[in-house]
Amino acid sequence: MRYAIVTDLHGDLAALRRVLSDVRRERVDRVLCLGDVFECHVSKRDRPGYAFTSVEAVFDQVPELVTLLEGAVVVRGNQEERIASLVPDHALPSWSRRVLGAPLEYRTSFATYCHGHPLPWQQVEPGKWYPLEAEFAGRALVHGHHHRSAVHRLPRTGRAWPDVTPLPFRFGEPVPLPAGHRYLVNVGQVRGARPNWAVVDEQAATVTYHRPEESA
């Protein structure tokens, strides 16, 4: 299977359109979205004691975000979990329920795909966080949440940061993920002026990072 991986949209409809236009030029079998499709307007800091007034106050009503992901595999992110905890069930728009109620992860024999917010994150350098101690099924842990495009090879034993190997990449060029090691694959974010996404080719055992052309 060849999966087009998108994550961390944060309500950016224009960026999602650009990425999906890019995806259509690749030979993928399925799109897999790793969550944070929506952007919650209520921060973690403001969440305690928050009194619900309207759906619009919690997140923007953009059903096209969900329409564009029709047919995709979707897992939920922390934004979806916060929205679902703040909006009473009876008030949730019907179009949002598939995303808000999505599972936390998607597994294949090759990889575990998830948003990543429940993972045990470690700050290994200022501003750089990685789920070094995460347990996962398969050869690779493919995640979002921390908005960086990066792939790292884990050591055969232990998870000490000095023994973790960053694998360099160029957009559009496959990075091999050979057997015998395990990998952390951070896809990067769709949101923003320069959205990132990736193709995970499970048969070829590669990850290829992509960025839409500036003129797209």
Image (cartoon, rainbow, N blue to C red):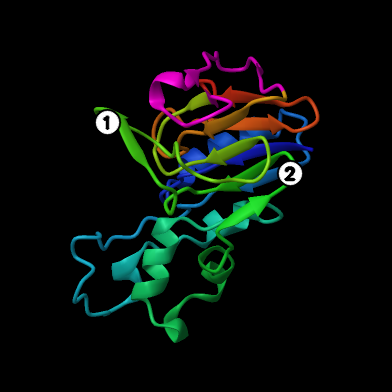
x and y, in percent, of residue 206 in the image: 69, 24
Residue 167 horizontal/vertical position (percent):
53, 16
The quarter holding residue 121 reads top left
Identify whether 80 is placed above or below 34: below
Main SS category, magenta section? loop
Mark number displayed over residue 127? 1
The quarter of the image holding the C terminus is top right
The reply, left or right, for residue 140 in relation to residue 204 is left
Side of 184 where 72 appears, left or right: right
Residue assigned mark 2: 30
Residue 53, horizontal then vertical, whole percent: 26, 80
Residue kind at label 2, given as amino acid type: Arg
Q: Nearer the viewer, residue 147 or 9?
A: 147
Say which residue appears at 58% left-offset and 30% top-offset.
Answer: 183
Q: Mark 1 and mark 2 in contact (Cβ < 8 Å)?
A: no
Q: Is residue 17 above or below residue 169?
A: below
